[in-house]
Amino acid sequence: MLQSFAWLVVAASVCLAPCRSQDVSPEAQRTAEDHFETHVRPVLAKHCIECHGGENYEAGLRLDNHDAVMKGGDSGPLLVAGNPDESRLIRVIRYDGLTQMPPDGKMSDDEIALLENWIRDGAIWPEDRQDTSPATSTASPAPRTAAEWSQIHWAFQPVVEPQLPEVNDQAWLKSPLDAFVLHKLEAKGLSPSEVATRRELLRRLSFDLIGLPPTQQEISDFENDPSPDAWDRQIERLLGSPQYGERWARHWLDIARYADTKGYVGVGEGDIERREYPFAFAYRDWVVTALNDDLPYDQFIRLQIAADKMEVADPKSLAALGFFRVGRVFLGNRNDQIDDKIDVMSRGLLGLTVACARCHDHKFDPIPTADYYSLFGVFSSTQEPDDAENKRMLLADADNPHNSRIFKRGNPGTQGDEVPRRFLEVLSQPDRQPFTEGSGRLELAQSIASSQNPLTARVMVNRVWAHHFGSPLVSTPSDFGVRTPEPVHHQLLDHLAHQFMQSGWSLKELHRVICRSNTYQQSSRQRESCFLVDSENSLYWRYSRRRLDLEQFRDSMLVVSGDLSIEMGGPPVELTTAPYSSRRTVYGRIDRQNLPGMFRTFDFANPDSHSPGRFLTSVPQQGLFVFNHPFVIERAQQLEKDLSAIPAENETARIEQLFAKILARNPQPHEIDMARKYVASARENSAASDTLNAWAQLAQALIMTNEFMYID
C-alpha cells in the first residue's frame, strides 16, 4: 500500500528510414497517416512537386511517392527518420548550406517546423498513397454514389435499431445493451465478471461523471443504502451536479482543439496581447453550461456551426460559435485556417478525414476534392468578428457569399473548376442541392445534426462509450471511413446510437443507459480464463482498470487537501506558477505554443488540432512530479496541517484521518502498522535534512499509491 507508485520507463527506438508502418497501435498509425495527408503532403505539393514530381523531375529526386523519397536523389539520401538535423531535406529548406530550396524563397517557419516534426516522429508516409497523377484525377475507390456506398461500408448505412440477440443467462441482463455484450461473450465461451463492490462502483461513477473522487461519507452512505434504486439515485445526483458539465466539457474541448492563445504569431514573447484569444473562455463556459443543461446534442452541434443564423432564446448561445474560432491562426494564412475548420468539423462531428482531400481526391474515402472545396466555399464566405461588449468570439456571413474554385494540388495559384457550396456527396441524397442561405453554415449544420445522417450519432456515442470504458467500440474515434473495419460490437453501437436519437439526443440519458447496465458495473479483477481468449478485453468481460488523467489527478489532490474551489467560469487561470490556483483544471490557461510541462507529462491533448483521444504514457517524469513539484508538496503539507487537532502521540487517529481524506476509507490493521513504521523512518530522515515533515511524507506516499491514482 505505501510503496511508491511503480513508474515504467518507456524506451523509444527510432528507425533510420522513412516508414510505412511502425510498431505502433493502429490508431496512432492512422493518426500519423492522416497528419501526413492533411499537413505534410500539402507543403510538399506547394513547394516541391513542380520540380520534383511526375516524370520530368530534377536532380534525380522525386518527392511525390514513398519509394522515390526512400531512394533519394543525385546528392544521396534525403531523410533520416527520427533525426531532422541529419536529414538533407531539412538542411536545404533551412538554407543552411550552398543548396537552398525552394530556390524562389524560403518556406515559412511554420512549414519548416511541420516537416521537422514529421521527420522527428518517424517520417511516416502512408502506404500506396503515391501522387503521380494530376491533382484533378479521381483516386478514390469506386463506386462513388451515396446509394452504392450505403450498401458497402457499414458506417455509411442508416442507423436502425437492431434486434436484441438471444442469450442464455437472461438473469444477468439489466439493460438491453447487456444483451449485445453477453451474446458476444457466450459465443466465445466466456462469461461476464461479478459485480464490483459498492465502493468501487461509486468511485468509478464519480470520476466518470464529475471527474472527482467521492468522499468517505458518500461511499459509506451508498454502501449502507438498501433501497433498490440506490444506484440510480447516485447516477442522478452526479448528473445533476454542476461539476458534471465541467468534467464533460473538457472531453469536448479536446475535440474542439481548445486553447486560450493563437499559437505562433510572429511576435516577441512579451507581446502577450497579440498572442491571446481574449474571449476564448466564453466558448469554454458555454460548453459547460450546455452540458449541465443537457442541451440536445443535435442543437449543441447546430449552435456551434451557425448560432448567428438561428433564432435562439438565449443570446448567450452565440458564444457557441467559438468552436471554429479557438484554433491556430497559422500566421494569418486564411486558407490554412479554413482547412483547420473543415478538419475539426469533419473529424470531430462526422468521423471523416475530409481535410485529406485538400490537394487531391481522398485516397481511400469517397470524398473528392470538389467536396472539400464545397465546404471551403462555406467558410471562405464567413467572417470572424469579436463581440467585445459581451466578451465572445463570433461568426458572421460575408456580405457577398461565394463559391470556391478547386485549388489544384492545394495551390491557390492554380485553380480549377468552380464548385457550389453544399454537403458531402457520400452523406447526401441523390438530388443533392447547393446551399442557398448566405454562407450555407445553417444548412451545413442541419445536414450534420440530422437523424438521417448515419455518422453523427454513431461518432458521439462511440466517444461517450470510450470515456466510460477506457476504449471505444470503434478503435479510430475520428475516422469512420472505409479503412475502418466493422467493429466487433457494431449492433451495440447502432443500438446506442438509435436510442440516443430517440431520447431527443440527450447525453445525460445516454449516460444513464450505460451506467445502469451490468456491463458497466462489472468488477475490474483479472480472470486468466478470459484473458487467454480476449487479452484486450474487446468483448468487455470485465471493467478495464484506468489511470486518472491530468484533470482527475490534479483536481483530486485539491479535493483531498480541502482546497478545491467550486467557482465556475471566467477567464483562464495559471495553474503551474505559484501561488498555485485552487480552481479546477478545466479553467487552466492553455497556451498552445508553450504548453506547460505538467500538461505534457500527464498526456494532455495537443491543442494544435482536433484530438481523437489522448495517448497514455508511463514515464519517469510523472513520478518525479509527484515527488518534487511544489503543488503536490503544498497539498501534502495542507493535509499534515489538518492533523494538528489530533495529539501527536495518537498516531492511529492521525493515520485514520489521512486514509479517510486521501483514500476515503479506514485503514486495515496491517496498514496502520506499516504507516507507523513509515512515519518513524521519515521522521529520522527529515530530522537530518530539510525535507517534508514525516506526516506530510505519509500523505504524499498515499497520493502516490495505485489506489489513489487508478479507477477500478
Image (spheres, rainbow, N blue to C red):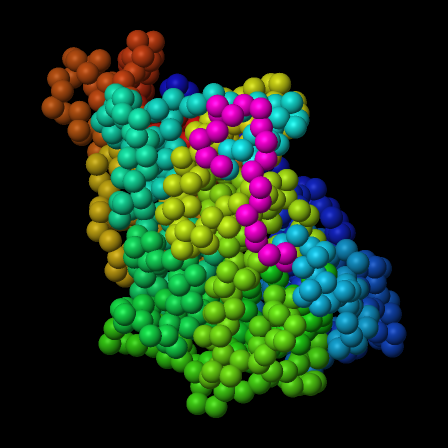
- Measured as percent of width and height from the top left, residue 359 is found at 68, 73
Which quadrant of the view contains residue 198? top left
Foreground residue, 74 or 288?
A: 288
Residue 57: quadrant of the picture: bottom right
Residue range in magenta is 156-176
Left or right of 648 in this view: 13: right
Q: Locate the C terminus by quadrant.
A: top left
Q: Position of residue 143 (x, y in %)?
A: 76, 65
Q: Residue at x 48, y 64 (%)?
A: 449
Image spot of residue 654 (x, y percent) = 21, 19
Name the residue: 54% across, 23% down. Answer: 169
Residue 598 in view, yes or no: no
Q: Nearer the viewer, residue 444 or 359?
A: 444
The answer to whether 241 is drawn above or below residue 180 in the figure is: below
Apparent side of residue 646 relative to residue 120 in the rendered image (left or right)? left
Residue at the image point whose x is 69% and y is 71% from the top: 368
Instruction: Reply yes or no: does residue 237 show up in magenta.
Output: no
> Percent position (x, y) of residue 120?
64, 54
Q: How many marks?
A: 0
State yes or no: residue 171 in magenta. Answer: yes
Q: Can residue 618 be seen in this snapshot?
A: yes
Place residue 650 in its image quadrant: top left
- Camera-nearest residue between 63 and 420: 420
Quadrant that contains the N terminus: top left
Q: Is residue 476 above or below residue 395?
A: above
**What residue is drawn where x is 34% and y is 9%?**
670
Magenta stretch: dominant secondary structure = loop
Q: As drawn, is 408 to the left or to the right of 511?
A: right
